Amino acid sequence: MTFQQELIDWYYKNKRDLPWRHTKDAYTIWLSEIILQQTRVEQGLPYFHRFLANFPTVGAFAAASEEQVLKLWQGLGYYSRCRNMHATAQVVVNDFGGVFPDSHDALLKLKGIGEYTAAAISSFATGEPRAVVDGNVFRVLARYFGVYTAINSPAGKKEFYSLANELLHRNNSADYNQAIMEFGAIQCKPKSPLCITCPLSQDCYAFKHNEVSTLPVKLKKAPQKHRYFNYFICRDDENILLQQRQAGDIWQHLYDFPCIETLEMLDPQGDAFVEALADNFGANVSYTLLSSKKHILTHQIIHIKFFELKNYIFNFSKQKKLNWVSLHKLDELPQPKVIHDFVIEFLL
């Protein structure tokens, strides 16, 4: 039996029952693909249902405000994906008459849709013979065929895409693509793969040569940047001071508290911290440390301290991005997960 048919037979017996596998609708498939980028199925599934319930059509998605969309996305991370989705929905309504495109080449013209996503949507919606290559596919191909070229190098991407297209089952591309991705997700897992029960192990290079833990090869990433955020909780009866983050940094257009970012972790009792606080909130300000958190993102680690302030003075003419918000409406605003978790624990 061929490599392709082994995978398809395995898929028919072992595939998970996922809602986007019961439709050929390009819009629904697009929702699932974007939500599941860099997200486990178990984590992404509730978001998929939430988005589809709130925006059953691309027109409904396009008509929503960015704030509504970001709130639904809250906690999923990589917020640029969400903003790109919203922009794409509006383009589809304005330029495609509200009909979500389902051909590979048309999909590539949309914001936030790259080669992988275009291939996945076109393959699953129409059966267009396009090879889908994600992290699961990289892993299966590297192990089975013994490919040592780094998967995150230009040469590696070229080699793996070439191999994937060569192997593509032209008459059943949709099921084959689903099969190899599902196989990588639940059989040929990154850690502790199920090699003993694997139907491909007899011809798998990595299994035969004891290289399962070595493949695929990946170039080391640049070290994560460390940043230090000092958040200040300023209350006035039932109101709290918030800012909306702007473009050019993490958490664009999400809401958080007044913040002083420092180059290193400052001692809350040290002169540098006290001076910075007095410069921003007046000489008579007093403060209490409420919580310390470490928030890990893909490329940076945010070290966070939350302080509650008393006797503060604030110059709104200099800090126009800050506004008072009712505590009762706080949960309606999109926030970074670390802020949302703090709000639940300390403010609501």
Image (tube, rainbow, N blue to C red):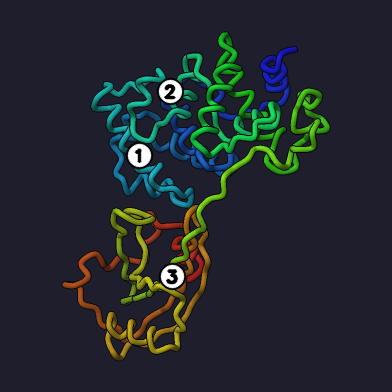
Tell me the residue at 32%/66% (across/down).
Answer: 242
Q: Is residue 174 left or right of residue 119?
A: right
* Res 257 quadrant in image: bottom left
* Disc 1 packing (10 Å; few <14; some 14–19; many ≥20): some
Disc 3/disc 2 C-alpha distance (Å): 42 Å
Front label number (3 vs 2):
3
Identify which amino acid the numbered label 2 is placed on. Answer: Ala
Q: Disc 2 marks which residue?
A: 26
Q: Is residue 346 left or right of residue 180?
A: left
Horizontal and vertical percent position of residue 156: 55, 33
Quadrant of the drawing holding the C terminus? bottom left
- The label shown at residue 228 is 3
Horizontal and vertical percent position of residue 191: 71, 43
Tell me the residue at 51%/14% (across/down).
Answer: 129
Query: From this viewpoint, which residue is outermost toward the top?
Result: 171
* Most foreground residue, 153 or 339: 153
Front label number (1 vs 3):
3
Q: Do tag 1 and tag 2 residues touch (Cβ < 8 Å)? A: no
Quadrant of the drawing holding the N terminus? top right
Disc 1/disc 3 C-alpha distance (Å): 28 Å
- The label shown at residue 84 is 1
Identify which amino acid the numbered label 3 is placed on. Answer: Tyr
- The label shown at residue 142 is none
Determine the secondary structure under disc 2. helix
Identify which amino acid the numbered label 1 is placed on. Answer: Asn
* Disc 3 packing (10 Å; few <14; some 14–19; many ≥20): some
Front label number (1 vs 2):
1
